[in-house]
Amino acid sequence: MTGTIVWDRIEPHARTADPGIGLAAAVADPLWFLARQWQLGELTGSDGGTAVLVDVQTSWSRFTRYLPQGSASTGATVDLDPGRPLEALVEQEPELVYAGAGTWRARVRAGRDLTRALHAAGLNVVAGRLRGHAGTRFDPPPVTGVEGPVDQRYRTLLHGATIDGAAILRCMATRPAGTTPTAGLPAEILAGLAPDDVSRLDTLIGDWSVRARNSWGLADVNHPEAAPAWVNERLEYAFTIAAPPLPGRTEELVLQAGEYDGDGLDWYALDRATPEAVAALGPVPPRDGATGTAVSTALAAPITFPGAPSDRFWELEDGAVSLTSGSGPTGLVKMAAVEFATVYSPDWLLAPVPVPVGCVAALDWVIVRDTFGVATVVSDATTRHGDIGLQFQPSAAPRPGAGPQSDTGPDGDEPLLVVLPSALGALRSAPRERVTIQRDEMANLAWAMEHTVVGPAGLGVEQNRPPGDTDLLTPATTSAYELIWRLATPVPSTWIPMIADAGRMLVRARLLDTPTGSLRAARSRIMADLRRLHEEEVTGAGCAVTMVDQLARGYDGRHYSWRGRVKQAGSGNADSGLRFDTTNPPR
């Protein structure tokens, strides 16, 4: 009776507690093994081709629509600029306001940009009139809050010396509907200009306003200090981006980021949007040239890692490879890593697939060709169902009442490749604002501590604790008293209390400043917008929110700068020393 023995692979399994015995592959007669390999046809290469080429067809669709979902969102979608980093759109803090306000730094730079444009166009007369007019020149208001040395220099050197960019925007906002951009300028600015000069000025100011919006951001009058995507109650960004349907499909691809902390966007920050987020985008507008299909061929390169074993089982290893060092019968993680390295490490190949930046792509099919010319379909619409190992893809939003979802198939996720137009390695400035929120278990409160506050010029002003900020106030006559009763002990002037309510929310409160008899108010923009905060956002370590300026180069080659917020972990609990209804010895 004869039989045939067929196997797919030989795996180094051992019945002892030492995995080194199986990895050693000790044999008494190596020549006998070579003969058996020749006898069984292993040396002939039959059905043992090595993958050489990979043919891939991809369908892609560019992201075209953006909808911020923060506390100051107006619910209006924005068309995406393909060359602009997505972070610059999501995070940008408005530094100019249509009402004519904003940081002095942004107002002066916007005015200088307009001045250079006017001089380049030969409209020097208009530039001089704008700089000399009381309604369009830069005149800093009186001191109303925190000012640093930079703010004082702006006030001294630039008072009345340049055009106020925010004032020009105010003129544009107050002009009658349907008129040209220059219709809102004072009449004396346009006096004596030729019609051609007025027409050129209209075009110039219109282009300048677009640059000002992209560089410094424009805020609505009702929300002059809030980024549209910033969620105050969560201290995070929330937004939705959408791409037209892929070729041959009918549904728009909508991805949603609900917990972006401002530390750089990547594919894992996005999920498949919920039905409510899809409905908020409205109908799908027609987009020409936003989708496409491409077939590419690439060389299949094996994926290796330092210390990986050789592909062939009986090949002599390098002396630096030591897969069993430090392992034992209780080292389950190490033994699992060794099994993966020895059994499955030769099975991974790398084939780059070119797709446009700022798109979502899908693999239509993948064909692998080996050294014998055999083509094998490894992925298409019929074979993809039931595939495993699709970890790197946006997860689907859970459906109400639905059970666990599979990775693929009708009830799961479709494998998508998301290539965001992100800023790679943006440069960051010193903090313009920094606020930490930490718990105080002794006082049963959470404290928002303002370390750095943005000044009128737009730069950070350190909030150093003044001397005697927490000293106890003592009556003038204390010789007759051994103890003095106090309603509450003082806390630093830069600390703002957050009180928990019944709905598991932290509500911003105000402390009474005993020397002045006034209530302390927030000085930072971060705390000015923060009225309520979900209690779970402030963990035992606390959280910190920093506002910084960032600079990056877009995919169109231009430089983009913006001001955004970054949420990070805090430094632990805080102790304010706040005590109520207490007595202290007189000082």
Image (tube, rainbow, N blue to C red):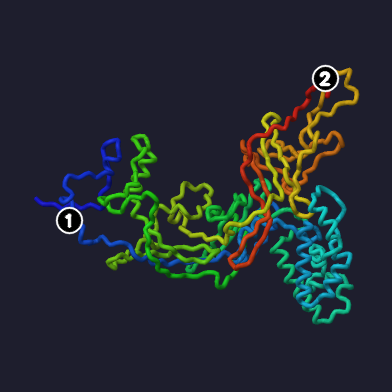
- Tell me the tag on residue 232: none
Q: How many marks?
A: 2
Mark 2 packing: few (<14 Cα in 10 Å), some, or many (20+)?
few
Mark 1 or 2, nearer chain start: 1
Instruction: Give the labeled residue for mark 2.
Output: 483
Circle 1 is placed at which residue position? Answer: 40
Q: Where does the image place residue 183, in percent across and percent down from the top left?
A: 83, 72
| Quadrant housing residue 509 | top right
Secondary structure type for disc 1 = loop
Distance from disc 1 to disc 2, alpha carbons, whole Å, reads 99 Å
* Residue drawn at the location 58% of the way across and 66% of the way down: 555
Q: Is residue 500 visible?
A: no
Q: Residues within 10 Å of mark 1 (few under 14, many from 20)?
A: few
State whether residue 238 appears in this view: yes
Residue 154 position in % (x across, y down):
81, 57
Question: In the picture shown, does residue 153 fall above or below 165?
Answer: above
**Quadrant position of the C terminus in the picture:** top right
Q: Is residue 557 left or right of residue 312?
A: right
Q: Amino acid at mark 2?
A: Leu
Q: Are marks 1 and 2 in contact (CB under 8 Å)?
A: no
Callout 1 amino acid? Leu
- Check disc 2 and report its element: helix, strand or loop: loop
Indicate the position of residue 395 as horizontal and vertical percent values. 50, 52
Snapshot quadrant of residue 381: bottom left
Q: Residue at x 39, y 58 (%)?
A: 384
Q: Nearer the viewer, residue 26 or 542?
A: 26
Q: Is residue 152 above or below residue 193?
A: above
Q: Residue at x 30, y 40 (%)?
A: 19
Q: Position of residue 571 (x, y in %)?
A: 63, 38
Q: Residue furthest front?
A: 319
